[in-house]
Image: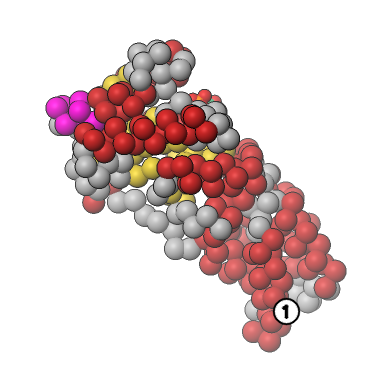
Amino acid sequence: MGSWFQSLRKTRDRLVDALRAVSAPTLAAPETREEIANLLITADVPMRLVQSLSREWEQSASRRESLAATLRRVLVAALEPAPTLDWHALPDPCTILLVGVNGSGKTTTAAKLARMALLAGRRPLLGATDTFRAAGSHQLKLWAERLGCEAVIGATGGDAAAVAYDAIDAALARGCDTVIVDTAGRMHTREPLMRELQKLGAAMAKRLPGAPHHTWVVLDAMLGQNAVVQARQFHEMTSLTGAIVTKLDGSSKAGFLFAVRQELELPIFFAGLGEAMDDLVPFDPAAFADALVNGDELK
Ligand SMILES: Nc1nc2c(ncn2[C@@H]2O[C@H](COP(=O)(O)OP(=O)(O)OP(=O)(O)O)[C@@H](O)[C@H]2O)c(=O)[nH]1
Ligand SMILES: [Mg+2]
């Protein structure tokens, strides 16, 4: 399983020299603090958070807190509270809709979520509404076979909303308690495609009032700040209940997560730390902040 520490290597590498300076026993000069602030910004940490960090740093001497400890404290606080998803406490059936731009990791994440659900003793059903490309639904079908879970696979060229409806219908008929609906990737700027997502959600609600219980945007961490722009657009069109961040292991701009949490106020449920099945983990603000500031070394 990918670790937080390994996964955040690229983002941490941007910061590491500067962080050594703040962890030095002597108080860092204002220029050093400014340099760190600038580096945080290059890692896509939002300006507002960096400014509040600078204010906290000005006071840290009187608090007798090291600059590194202040940094860690501010970063953790900016991400908390993290949501928890208790698979045992979800409604029966629970329906989850995954949305996002092309290639963000939706299909892989749908499979990883199904695996988590299975491990928690639930009966998941995967719904493949990516009817644009035969390969899209085929990919999810293979995952369902490998995981040994139920699936409803839309025919190529079919109506995505109808497939979402059928997925819930099949789940109710087959005694499945967790419906995970994968969607085709779409550019957040293409309004007709975004409207299609609304249709898809409405079809789910028609079959099961209250569905979808969760609508999560799947964000590719390699995109940094651009992922925030995407999330905002998806939020406007689909009322997201949260986000999942994938590919943290390849990103050097993981600081964008702070904007997802603070500016969009979206809970971050899970993080993808690698391509393997077990590499989707509950988002952990303390582990994230520690991995970012090289916590073990700096403490
Ligand atoms: N390193 C890494 N790779 C990931 C992660 N999540 C997904 N991927 C990879 O990203 C690529 C795209 O994943 P998909 O799940 O097909 O993405 P998608 O959003 O379904 O793509 P479209 O359906 O084309 O929009 C695949 O090669 C995945 O293995 C992650 O957390 N870390
Ligand atoms: Mg896909």
Q: Is residue 19 above or below residue 57?
A: above
Identify which residue is drawn at 37% across, 55% down.
84
- Taking the image as shown, residue 198 lies to the left or right of residue 59, namely left
Q: Is residue 213 above or below residue 74?
A: above
Counting other residues with Cα less than 10 Å from the Cα at mark 1, is it few (<14), some (14-19), or many (20 or more)?
Answer: some
- Residue 188 vs residue 169, the one in the foreground: 188
- Taking the image as shown, residue 26 lies to the left or right of residue 246, namely right
Say if residue 112 shows up in the picture.
Answer: no
- Residue 133 vs residue 290, the one in the foreground: 133
Residue 93 placement (x, y as % from top left): 21, 40
Q: Quadrant of residue 159?
A: top left
- Residue 138 vs residue 3, the one in the foreground: 138
Report the quarter where the C terminus lies.
Answer: bottom right
Residue 206 placement (x, y as % from top left): 23, 35
Task: Give the magenta-colored segment's residue range.
Answer: 168-174
Q: Quadrant of residue 208?
A: top left
Seen from this angle, which residue lies furthest bottom? 62
Identify which residue is drawn at 44% across, 63% down.
81
- Taking the image as shown, residue 16 lies to the left or right of residue 281, namely right
Residue 24 placement (x, y as % from top left): 76, 70
Say if residue 48 shows up in the picture.
Answer: yes
Reading the image, the residue beneath label 1 is 58
Residue 17 placement (x, y as % from top left): 78, 57
The main secondary structure of the magenta stretch is: helix
